[in-house]
Image (cartoon, coloured by chain):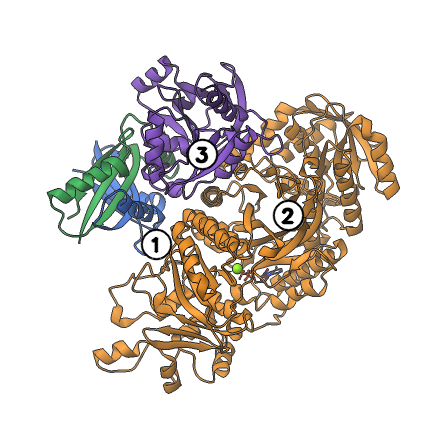
Chain colours: A purple, B blue, C green, D orange
Amino acid sequence: MTARIGVVTFPGSLDDRDARRAVQLAGAEPVALWHRDKDLRQVDAVVLPGGFSYGDYLRAGAIARFSPVMETVIAGARDGLPVLGICNGFQVLCESHLLPGALTRNDHLHFVCRDQRLRIENATTAWTSSYRPDQEIVIPLKNGEGGYVADERTLDMLEAEGRVVARYLELNPNGSRRDIAGVTNEAGNVVGLMPHPEHAVESLTGPGLDGLGFFTSVLKRLVNA
Amino acid sequence: MARVVVDVMLKPEILDPQGQAVQRALPRLGFSGITDVRQGKRFELEVEGPVDAAALARIREMAETFLANTVIEDFDVRVQS
Amino acid sequence: MARVVVDVMLKPEILDPQGQAVQRALPRLGFSGITDVRQGKRFELEVEGPVDAAALARIREMAETFLANTVIEDFDVRVQS
Amino acid sequence: MTTDAGTASERVSTTIDTVKRAVDTPGLAQPWAELGLKRDEYDRIREILGRRPTGAELAMYSVMWSEHCSYKSSKVHLRQFGEKAPPSDALLVGIGENAGVVDVGQGYAVTFKVESHNHPSYVEPYQGAATGVGGIVRDILAMGARPVAVMDPLRFGAADHPDTRRVLPGVVAGVGGYGNCLGLPNIGGEVVFDPCYQGNPLVNALCVGVMRHEDIHLAKASGVGNKVILYGARTGGDGIGGVSVLASETFADPSAAGTRPAKRPAVQVGDPFQEKLLIECTLEVFREKLVVGIQDLGGAGLSCATSELASAGSGGMRVELDSVPLRDATLSPEEILMSESQERMCAVVEPDKVERFLEICEKWDVLATVIGEVTDGDRLEIHWRGEQIVDVPPRTVAHEGPVYQRPYARPVWQDALQADDPAKLSRPGTPEELREAVLSLVASPNQASKSWITSQYDRYVLGNTVLAQPEDSGMIRVDEETNLGVALATDGNGRYAKLDPYTGAQLALAEAYRNVAASGATPLAVTNCLNFGSPEDPAAMWQFAEACRGLADACLALGTPVTGGNVSFYNQTGEVAIHPTPVVGVLGVIDDVTRRTPMGFTGEGDLLFLLGDTREELGGSAWSEVAHGHLGGLPPAVDLDRERLLAEVLVAGSRDGMLDAAHDLSDGGLVQALVESCLRGGLGARIVLPEGTDPFVALFSESTGRAVVAVPRSEELRFTDMCRARGLPATRIGVVDGDSLDVQGQFSIGLGELREASESTIPALLG
Ligand SMILES: Nc1ncnc2c1ncn2[C@@H]1O[C@H](COP(=O)(O)OP(=O)(O)O)[C@@H](O)[C@H]1O
Ligand SMILES: [Mg+2]
């Protein structure tokens, strides 16, 4: 049976179709989830896609966190449901306190879209096990509020516990503390990532295929489970 | 060292999508009784030396020409006690 | 109808790139004597009914859970005179 | 506005200027002049109605008969685009609708259009540019299409002018802020600096959308009893712009003084989130076939939407203006009719489908209200507080506005300008001087890398972007199974057009056409945004007339019909007009996007060919500007047959896998193109200029109909045979090799040095 991976659409989600395409290309069945439905339709994992949920006017992800679907996602995540938050999804996960820290306005104050080199620092999470430890990948990055911040203690803890999933290489594109591009929760089932792996799943439309690993990782995990 | 606060708000007749987004979300979060929300900017300036009339006039000019876009925004300058 | 103002500012230890950008631009525009600038948000809420202790408590809760992200921001609630 | 005396209660009732009152008070003085109408226009309105117009009617006629909405000065010239249109099987919907629609095969249709938002962007750069994007996206949506990409041709004052520092970052943030938030990839555009745009930047925005043939929707209201639904944002007092700001003062209701905002702002604030919901909601009502006719609300707001829908339909329309949801309860009916509040649409829906329509709106949190219905008469009737305030034949408002034959005359200075030949300018002679000239060309603001700007735009969203800036054209995959795609490029060179507007318009078309072909797509159709000075100035009007004539002639010659566009007049600072700036967008189709030709050199050892002929043509050139600040002489000659041939070769070369890279030659000539392709691909080139040529002319001339291509060695024979057979000159000029641009016998510049020159200029000015 193919794994079913849910992709949530909030009003203002933009990369939901792309995330579903990536899920499909990875060999799983994408399931569209609607922000107003608490029902997760028995999916095996959830992707919170990029975009500007509810316009992101207050703070990115601040309003989406209170949507009905998030109630179930938050509960599921605490029970081990694999959840990947990409960009706006990462912001929603931080606002929901499923992940520590917060994402703030880029230090240069501009939206930035570029092909970004990263190092995968934790290849054991639900979403990164297809990568080699310390593997370098290039995937698109596009955000206006992507600066990862947390207090020093939290940052130290994340590093000590190996919970920094990916770090920016060559250039820190948004002023993230300690070049952090993505983090995971203690259990490793919830991952937040600022860059967009779903835009690097076809050589025709992205910088390469380096993003596919996030989606194949979770498949592997679900099959082995 | 004194602190001067400059508040910049969209003029009342200008659409405020940010405030509206907050207002629309409130009932869903269980907050009622708020009939309107406007969202603006608050600047806190640390000023060297005394904040006399001349200093305030300069800050007001700064607010007018730089911190606010008076085509769509109003501003308010005051010394924080 | 009363107005309640909620000010939300980044905590002092969090980098404020917007405030810094403003500060950096000031000398170029001919403004000197400002040693620090912080930029935050100001919300103006129009509240139905009396703003008593209970109403203020609710608004404070709203600020804490929603208007501010207390991981990085502080807030201040007050009734506007 | 009333001068009647009376008791307070009487005054309240008489402030509604009803049709009945208009009949009873024929002599009432009306503010037609303040509303921008001419005496004879006002008289014509009275003649059409057989009485004086009501305040609301006057408001509607005045905005709809404005230059912006009625095209009264340009119409007689724009006609040529239809009259000289080349026969084309591809055109499904032509000029006159919100946007033209082109058949791209496999049952798909594509709609695209470019519009200006120049003046608002000078006043409030962020919001001006943002709402410019919002407006053109709604136009595309109103045709029934899903918007799939945007582009932004921009013009600013001198790069180092302080005001450019204010305007440019705001405009760029606005284009990005709106487009990024809508989830539309930005796939291209232009950034040009010239002092002539100092007080009048040009912010043009293009949107392209895709639909199935059967999904095409038109702006018309038919079917008696069908409901008119207004949906999207509430109507506010903002955006009662330009002429109408005055209007709102004029219509101020004295009884309400003090309770209403003192002044209606001319600036509109955009809400891209609302627009994103509007898009998804609209596409869903299309999918369920709930819509008979649809119109976006742009300039002139409800006045435009209701009169255009009614005018194009079969019946009349009745509207209850009290039903319009307001953001500001103090708005007068005139203001409601004129408001340009953003993010609104108007749909005509059969009665039994209204409920489902409203349900879908609710799903997307979009406010929707039935405001009227289609009637069996031929009148547009609008009611307010139970009284009739509008009763007009809608065609006279929307489609039968005034038409002017403005006087035009070739300016007296044109001859002197053309006689000021760049031949007299001193040229780099030694290899060292050539090298310096190349570096300063590459580093000049107009030639430098624009990535500081374009990296603020999302080019990946939707996952179908095959090519985006800085490629010659933006390319979007239309079908994920078959790999059908479209390519788009926009171009316009105000310097060329100033020297000769007829040729300048043709050059704009030729360049966009060449750009589309360079990426492997076959050019199909054209849109344009004609940015000019005042139509009341005979010199500017002559430039406009010449540009229209040139563009229409060239479209006929290239077989690419104009499908729509936009005219922006009054672009001037004081008395000084901008360079005439026709911006032309070309749409092309490509059967298989995997065959696209990128511009970067990536194949070490590939052979470089220069296609086309090089003459000494430096009038209006980038070199003359950068080296001498000079503008004079004649622009390069246009040869449209040659452009056609070149395009055929580029498309065939791409389809048959003969090309690793292709890049068209335009501003800055051969050397600029080589630098760009080297930097894009990360490989250098060794160039041997053909014997007997003047190296300066070979490198810097801007002769048209040229491109440089990189051909894998295995394809050399096949490619040169093809060029020979078709009669296109192909000169072998070197190979892709190493990490420098090496012009043998002249100079060599490392890619690092070139990259530094190209990439540091804009950040240094704006960063
Ligand atoms: N320069 C032009 N070339 C061709 N068609 C034009 C041009 N300018 C305007 N048009 C056409 O005239 C019609 C009205 O234009 P416009 O008022 O901009 O449309 P809308 O009302 O949708 O904003 C449109 O069909 C448009 O394509
Ligand atoms: Mg339109």
- Mark 3: is the Cβ under 8 angstroms from ligand 2? no
- Residue picked out by circle 3: A6
Which dot, 2 or 3, sits closer to the camera?
3
- Residue picked out by circle 1: B14
Residue D347 lies, in percent from the top left, at 47, 62
D141 relative to D371, above or below: above
Q: Quadrant of residue A37?
A: top left
Identity, as a three-letter code, of the amino acid under mark 1: Ile
| D653 relative to D192 in the view: left or right | right
Residue D636 lies, in percent from the top left, at 74, 48
> Which chain letter matches label 3?
A
Which dot, 1 or 2, sits closer to the camera?
1
Give the crowd class for mark 2: few <14, some 14-19, many >=20 residues within 10 Å.
Answer: many
Q: Quadrant of the C terminus of chain A?
A: top left
* Residue B8 visible from this viewpoint: no
**Outermost front residue:** A1
- Residue picked out by circle 2: D491
